[in-house]
Image (cartoon, grey):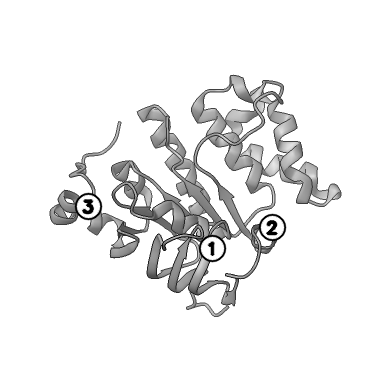
Amino acid sequence: MSATEPLLKCEGLVAGYGGPAIVRNVDLAIPANEMMTLVGPNGAGKSTLLRAFYGLTKTYSGRILFESRTIEKTSPLERYASGVAFVPQGRCNFDRMSVAENLAVAAHSVPVAKRAEALDYVLGLFPTLKPLMSSMAGNLSGGEQQLLEMAMVLQTRPKCLLVDEPSLGLSPRMQVSVFEKLADLRSAGMTVVAVEQNVRVALAVSDRAAVLVHGEIAFEGPAGEILADDRIRSAYLGGQPIAAAH
């Protein structure tokens, strides 16, 4: 991959779940070391596009490329091994297992000799989890569970992290905290692609954003410009204000 090539991109992507196409003729390029957030009305195809990047939908036509290699025909496990990680919407940990046990299960693809190093890495990213290692995952707060789920997939040190609705069900303060963590990952050199309904919080820390409408990209560009455009916010983002979150 050349320095000018995006890390992840799709060309003419049409995707769905076996029935009618949900994502329609999407072209999107995501540069390395940037954070891109997909926003838009409910049912616009945001999560389907994110899942298509990870191989969880059916690609009807078009291409998906990661590091300039076509991956639309590869499995999610193959994409994970190549450096793409995915955190789905909603809670996806083992609630009757401890934090330590969840992390151990998720480290199955890390070489045994490197698992201690991988654990140290994610606990360094999310120090909040350190005193919770013996706690049952189901007893954690929603925000703590979201951090755990990110830590679980980050043990392999992926190049690209896909996150679907990371603020879902969280308090306003924890929503901001989670996106600050995602911004920290971006600052450390990881590419982050998020789907998010809380436009104000997400775009405040994103480099770029794409607005999806009816499965197609209506607008794409610098996050700050999209958030500040009254016409876009009014027509597609529910008129969410641009005031800073607290």
The residue at which mark 3 appears reads as 236
Picture layout, residue 151 above or below residue 17: above
Q: Secondary structure at mark 2?
A: helix
Instruction: Say few, some or many: other residues with alpha carbon within 10 Å of mark 3 (under 14 / 14 to 19 / 20 or more).
Output: some
> Which image quadrant for residue 130?
top right
Q: Position of residue 110 (x, y in %)?
A: 77, 50
Q: Give 19 or 195, whichever is nearer the viewer.
A: 19
- Measured as percent of width and height from the top left, residue 76 is found at 64, 58
Dot 1: element: strand
Identify which residue, 63 or 177, lies in the foreground. Answer: 63
Give the alpha-carbon distance from disc 1 to disc 3, as whole Å: 26 Å
Tally the marks. 3
Q: Earlier in the sequence, mark 1 or mark 3?
A: 1
Marks 2 and 1, the one that precedes in the sequence? 1
Which label number is shown at residue 77?
Answer: 2
For the residue marked with disc 1, what is the amino acid? Lys
User: Do tag 3 and tag 2 residues touch (Cβ < 8 Å)?
Assistant: no
